[in-house]
Each structure stands twice: as structure tokens, then as C-alpha cells.
Image (cartoon, rainbow, N blue to C red):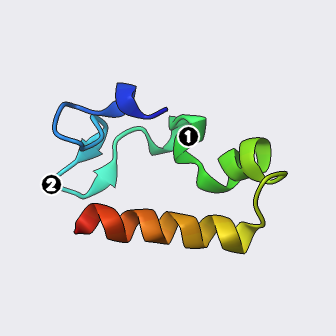
């Protein structure tokens, strides 16, 4: 769901490397608004704490 945001090197095309900020933060897509995305798409499948745990595991795996 986020491939269209990838600038080609697994970094979001709206990420400013100088400031480490999102260039479209106020208008970012739903997939970037984690809590809203969770409520709309995943809250019936996962409890919030389980959702957070899954995401933390994914982040740790990506770092490896």
C-alpha cells in the first residue's frame, strides 16, 4: 500500500533528509496516519496492543 510513496530506495518521496520531517505532514495519506488507518482497516482484526507489537516486530526485522 505504500509502494507509490517509495522514491526508489525504500525511503518515502516526501521525506526531507535535511530536516528529517515529512514534507506533506498536514496532507499525508491515510496509510501514514497510523491510528486512523488502524481504526478504519484493522481494528476489527487486531487489538491495538497486538497491532503495535506486530509493527515493532516488522521494524526490528527490517533493521536486521
The residue at the point 37 percent across, 25 percent down is 4
Q: Quadrant of residue 10?
A: top left
**Lateral position of residue 59 relative to residue 48, left or right:** left
Return the x and y of residue 3 as percentages of the image width and height. 37, 30
The answer to which of 58 and 20 lies nearer the viewer is 58
- The numbered dot on residue 18 is 2
Say which element carries label 1: helix
Residue at x 23% of width, y 47% of height: 16
Q: Which mark is residue 46?
A: none
* Mark pair 2, 1: CA separation: 23 Å
User: For the residue carrying disc 1, how many other residues have a C-alpha within 10 Å: few (<14), some (14-19), or many (20+)?
Assistant: few
Quadrant occupied by the C terminus: bottom left
In the displayed orientation, state which residue is furthest to the top: 4
**Residue 51 location, quadrant:** bottom right
Horizontally, residue 9 falls left or right of residue 57, namely left
Question: How many circles with numbers are drawn on the protein?
Answer: 2
Looking at the image, residue 53 lies above or below residue 39: below
Q: Secondary structure at mark 2?
A: loop
Work out whether mark 2 precedes mark 1 in sequence or the reverse, and give the earlier one.
2
Q: Nearer the viewer, mark 2 or mark 1?
A: 1
Percent of width and height locating residue 62: 29, 61
Q: Are marks 2 and 1 in contact (CB under 8 Å)?
A: no
Quarter of image, res 61? bottom left
Q: Residue at x 52, y 45 (%)?
A: 32
Q: Is 18 positioned to the left or the right of 39 in the image?
A: left
x, y percentage for residue 46? 75, 60
Image height of 1 relative to 25, above or below = above
Task: Name the residue that disc number 1 marks.
Answer: 31
Q: Residue at x 68, y 70 (%)?
A: 50
Amino acid at each position: 500500500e505504500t509502494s507509490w510513496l517509495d522514491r526508489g530506495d525504500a525511503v518515502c518521496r516526501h521525506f526531507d533528509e535535511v530536516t528529517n520531517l515529512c514534507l506533506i505532514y498536514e496532507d499525508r495519506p491515510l496509510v501514514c496516519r497510523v491510528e486512523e488507518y488502524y481504526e478504519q482497516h484493522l481494528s476489527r482484526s487486531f487489538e491495538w496492543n497486538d497491532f503495535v507489537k506486530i509493527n515493532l516486530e516488522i521494524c526490528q526485522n527490517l533493521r536486521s
